[in-house]
Image (cartoon, grey):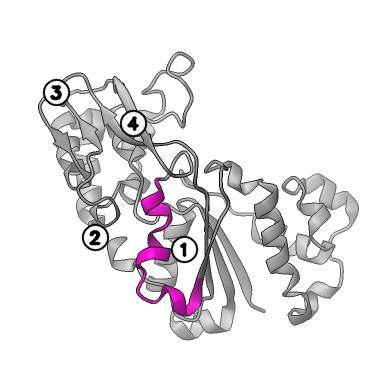
């Protein structure tokens, strides 16, 4: 029985790493029907630079939550390395400015060094050194996995952060101004679209689909996305005999509480399989 894998956010590069590193082409051909990657930060996001210097509150204003409320977790999390903007996608674009200089994606570890322990210090630098180049080396489609890259655009997304003083030991301030570009509100468009534009074998086994004007998190419950996933799964019914018989009754379905709208769109056997396969948890980026 083959599985359709659906990943979201940091779950996308995580699944990509799994396919390339831990299983063979033969295993993928035997066990994977397809993969849908939603809102993947394939090569990071500019917001991680702010997370290291100020903390990132996912759009909640500073007057409601202090800018550094969750910063101690963010700067010490290994997932921060994979969320750090990569020069492969962001090039020489300025991401952080101070009164005297500009910093690009190539300078993130220098910023961590300058800010010291407030930005994760030696631990964050060690994680970057350990995982350096890992994501960049994975940027091609996994063979024997029909892959769909789904993402949003048209949402104001932070791409540059201006600070009022130089970055130095103990730095922990909010930017004085933020500049915005295209993306899904969290991940910048150049990272969201990277597979579509730059994976060398994308056209052979992959496709892309854009759902405009929906945020990074809301894509999980957007009606267009839910219907599109349901359509993908419906096509598998005739290929998976065990799904032809209902395996969950209505009382259990109500208790599990599937995503809004999903119970109306999926046949009960497929809904059961989706709920069963979706029981795992995720970190900062979901999965």
> Of discs 2 and 3, which sits in the foreground?
3
> Of discs 4 and 2, which sits in the foreground?
4
Q: Where is residue 95 in the image (x, y as percent from the top left)?
A: 25, 38
At mark 3, the secondary structure is loop
Residue located at (75% from left, 49% from top): 258
Residues marked 4 and 3 touching at CB (< 8 Å): no
Q: Mark 4 points at which residue?
A: 179
Residue located at (29% from left, 23% from top): 175
> Of discs 1 and 3, which sits in the foreground?
3
**30 vs 262, nearest the viewer:** 262
Looking at the image, which residue sits at the far bottom?
Answer: 26
Q: Mark 1 points at which residue?
A: 15
Q: Name the residue under label 3.
A: 99
Instruction: Tell me if residue 247 comes above or below residue 104 in the rendering.
Output: below
Residue extent of the magenta highlight: 188-206
Q: Mark 2 points at which residue?
A: 133
Residues marked 4 and 1 touching at CB (< 8 Å): no
Is residue 168 found left or right of 253 in the rendered image?
Answer: left
């Amino acid at each position: 029985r083959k599985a359709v894998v659906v990943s979201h956010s940091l779950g996308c590069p995580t699944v990509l790493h799994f396919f390339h590193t831990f299983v063979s082409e033969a295993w993928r051909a035997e066990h994977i029907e397809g993969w849908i990657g939603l809102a993947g930060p394939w090569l990071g996001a500019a917001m991680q630079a702010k997370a290291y210097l100020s903390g990132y509150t996912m759009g909640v204003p500073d007057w409601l939550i202090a800018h550094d409320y969750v910063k101690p977790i963010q700067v010490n999390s290994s997932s921060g390395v994979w969320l750090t903007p990569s020069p492969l996608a962001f090039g020489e674009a300025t991401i952080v400015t101070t009164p005297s200089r500009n910093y690009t994606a190539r300078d993130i570890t220098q910023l961590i060094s300058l800010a010291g322990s407030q930005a994760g210090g030696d631990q964050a630098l060690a994680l970057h050194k350990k995982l350096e180049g890992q994501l960049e080396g994975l940027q091609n489609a996994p063979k024997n996995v029909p892959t769909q890259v789904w993402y949003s655009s048209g949402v104001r997304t932070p791409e540059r952060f201006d600070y009022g003083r130089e970055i130095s030991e103990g730095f922990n301030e909010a930017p004085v101004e933020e500049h915005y570009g295209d993306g899904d509100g969290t991940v910048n468009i150049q990272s969201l679209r990277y597979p579509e534009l730059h994976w060398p074998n994308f056209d052979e086994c992959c496709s892309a689909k854009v759902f405009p004007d929906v945020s990074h998190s809301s894509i999980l419950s957007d009606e267009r996305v839910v219907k599109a996933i349901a359509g993908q799964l419906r096509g598998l019914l005739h290929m998976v005999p065990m799904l032809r018989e209902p395996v969950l009754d209505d009382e259990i379905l109500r208790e599990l509480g599937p995503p809004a709208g999903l119970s109306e769109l999926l046949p009960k056997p497929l809904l059961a399989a989706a709920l069963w396969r979706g029981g795992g948890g995720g970190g900062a980026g979901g999965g």
